[in-house]
């Protein structure tokens, strides 16, 4: 069975190599990466001989951090990346080489950094969902600021990162996965890093506490309701995950039972019992995912209780959110991010604004209050349906939402000779594409506001826009994902005259 990577924190970013090889040289890094950066190829006899694993304990000193928060150290002409090693620290590191692969494991820190702290989460080293809990808050912020400063250097000086006062309990969306332990008792928790091994965990410190409690209640109910946890290896069993979304302002809660088959005997009694234990639950859905996939949700969905969506308030507007729609996972910081994005858009009431990659329409609907007209585009059908509904429920008359690929949509807009004064774009981690960016250049909006959860792809796209007539006028990083390496940034570009 292939061990898939931890899919728990999908929206805050698939685990990616942030580091561009050009910038830092060759990959000699974290588990399983190749030193030559090449993909799989034919193996020579020499490769096969080299493949027997060698582990050596090396004494190394950390000179800095990679974009994914690992300590950089030079060793025997190689650049090692060591998880949880901090700048200035000397440490013993187990270095295993197998062919071209180099794995590292921090064994002992000889001179701990003054910024090193004991992670408050007992699962930190196993889980991998957070990567920075071994650093105090100042060191975390310094790391994020430096990451942004370095990547944005060609474009200007970023502002100081907007931090979160209470950088825990912030996620409004969480998953619990279920399985059996050796004693065949049901366990529930998160996957250990890069595996599908469940760490039994009652509480994740960045989840909403109420959501974790509901997850544990469900775990406790499974035996009496004869719900077997799904086993990925055998394809047997029923309950795969529970996805919980919380409206942090409204207090509304959605529980999605992700199951392997649509037949759920005793569902009425289950719903009754769960609601009795947690009267705060607003809606319960059944989602059927019978595929061998690391995607959490399947396509089939059935509402077992309530309206099937939850509502939350953001920047003074009300938003309905479906199970499958994207909604920013840290609403406290999202309000700061959106406020900055709207400020950068410099709206006066007359502008035509494109909200590209609009999700459920949040940014566009907030902007609509200060714009002439808003055009939103989004790929996910459920999200577009939510955006249209959200437009109505907030009495917005000047916004239209379209389903489709943002690049294709913009190409058509440009071909039709339509006009846009401001483009606000918020693409997924992979960033935008040339179809989109070249159409922006054709449409010639006066301002482009680029919101991104991946500064590497953002920097790549900014380069294109800067080459084609735009100047960067402001860069604001926001800590949307405290304790993790992820960092969000919003950038203002203006058309040079
Ligand atoms: N602006 C929204 C959503 C940002 S997340 C918010 O702040 O909530 C990025 C969104 O881009 C997701 O909703 C995703 O479904 C959408 N998306 C991904 N690829 C896309 C594409 N090629 N064209 C349009 N939308 C896309």
Image (cartoon, grey):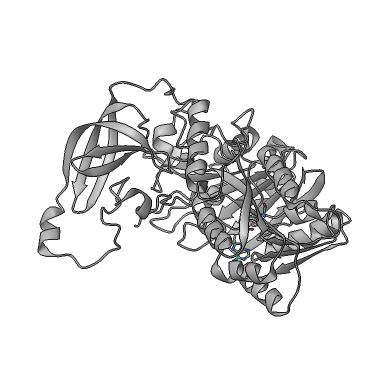
Q: Which of the 4 quarters of the picture holds residue 232?
A: bottom left
In this rendered view, identify the residue nearer to me: 139 or 275: 139
Asked if residue 12 lies left or right of residue 385, the reply is left
Q: Which of the 4 quarters of the picture holds residue 389?
A: bottom right
Q: Is residue 260 visible?
A: no
User: Residue 264 in the image: x percent, y percent?
Assistant: 61, 56
Point out the residue furthest to the bottom here.
416
Q: Is residue 443 visible?
A: yes
Number of disc labels: 0
In this rendered view, identify the residue nearer to me: 83 or 228: 83
**Vertical side of 116 occupied by 477: above or below:** below
Asked if residue 303 lies left or right of residue 400, the reply is left
* Residue at left offset 55%, top offset 40%: 219
User: Residue 297 in the image: x percent, y percent?
Assistant: 57, 57
* Residue at left offset 48%, top offset 38%: 146
* Residue at left offset 52%, top offset 27%: 137
Q: Which of the 4 quarters of the picture holds residue 333?
A: top right
User: Residue 259 in the image: x percent, y percent?
Assistant: 56, 55
Quarter in which the N terminus is drawn: bottom left
Quarter in which the C terminus is drawn: bottom right
Locate ligand 1 by image quadrant: bottom right
User: Residue 335 in the image: x percent, y percent?
Assistant: 72, 41
Asked if residue 8 lies left or right of residue 42, the reply is right
């Amino acid at each position: 069975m292939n061990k898939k990577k931890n899919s728990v924190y999908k929206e805050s970013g698939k685990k990616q190599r942030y580091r561009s090889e050009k910038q830092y040289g060759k990959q000699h890094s974290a588990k399983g990466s190749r030193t030559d950066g090449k993909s799989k190829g034919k193996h020579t006899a020499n490769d096969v001989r080299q493949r027997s694993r060698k582990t050596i304990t090396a004494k190394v000193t950390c000179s800095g951090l990679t974009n994914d928060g690992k300590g950089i150290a030079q060793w025997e002409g190689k650049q090692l990346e060591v998880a949880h090693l901090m700048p200035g620290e000397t440490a013993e590191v187990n270095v295993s080489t197998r062919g071209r692969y180099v794995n590292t494991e921090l064994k002992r820190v000889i001179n701990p950094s003054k910024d090193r702290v004991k992670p408050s989460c007992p699962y930190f080293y196993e889980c991998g969902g957070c990567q920075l809990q071994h650093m105090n808050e100042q060191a975390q912020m310094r790391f994020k600021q430096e990451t942004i400063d370095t990547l944005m250097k060609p474009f200007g000086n970023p502002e100081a990162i907007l931090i979160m006062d209470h950088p825990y309990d912030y996620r409004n969306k969480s998953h619990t996965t279920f399985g059996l332990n050796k004693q065949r008792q049901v366990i529930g928790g998160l996957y250990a890093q890069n595996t599908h091994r469940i760490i039994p965990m009652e509480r994740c410190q960045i989840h909403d506490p109420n959501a974790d409690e509901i997850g544990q209640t469900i775990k406790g109910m499974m035996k009496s309701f004869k719900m077997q946890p799904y086993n990925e290896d055998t394809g047997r069993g029923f309950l795969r995950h529970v996805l919980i979304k919380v409206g942090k302002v409204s207090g509304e809660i959605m529980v999605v039972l992700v199951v392997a088959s649509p037949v759920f005997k005793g569902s009425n009694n289950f719903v009754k019992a769960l609601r009795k234990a947690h009267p705060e639950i607003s809606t319960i859905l059944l989602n059927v995912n019978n595929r061998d996939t690391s995607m959490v949700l399947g396509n089939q969905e059935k509402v077992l209780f309530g309206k099937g969506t939850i509502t939350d308030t953001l920047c003074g507007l009300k938003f309905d959110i479906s199970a499958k729609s994207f909604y920013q996972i840290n609403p406290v910081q999202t309000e700061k991010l959106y406020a900055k994005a709207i400020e950068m858009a410099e709206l006066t009431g007359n502008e035509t604004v494109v909200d590209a990659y609009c999700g459920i329409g949040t940014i566009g609907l907030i902007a609509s209050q200060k714009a002439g007209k808003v055009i939103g585009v989004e790929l996910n059908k459920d999200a577009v349906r939510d955006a249209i509904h959200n437009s109505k429920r907030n009495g917005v008359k000047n916004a239209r939402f379209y389903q489709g690929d943002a690049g294709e949509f913009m190409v058509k807009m440009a071909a039709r000779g339509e006009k846009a004064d401001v483009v606000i774009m918020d693409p997924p981690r992979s960033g935008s594409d040339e179809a989109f960016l070249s159409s922006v250049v054709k449409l010639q909006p006066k301002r482009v506001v680029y919101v991104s959860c991946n500064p590497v792809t953002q920097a790549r796209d900014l380069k294109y826009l800067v080459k084609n007539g735009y100047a960067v006028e402001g860069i604001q990083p926001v800590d949307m994902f405290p304790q993790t390496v992820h960092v969000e940034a919003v950038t203002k570009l203006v058309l040079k005259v």
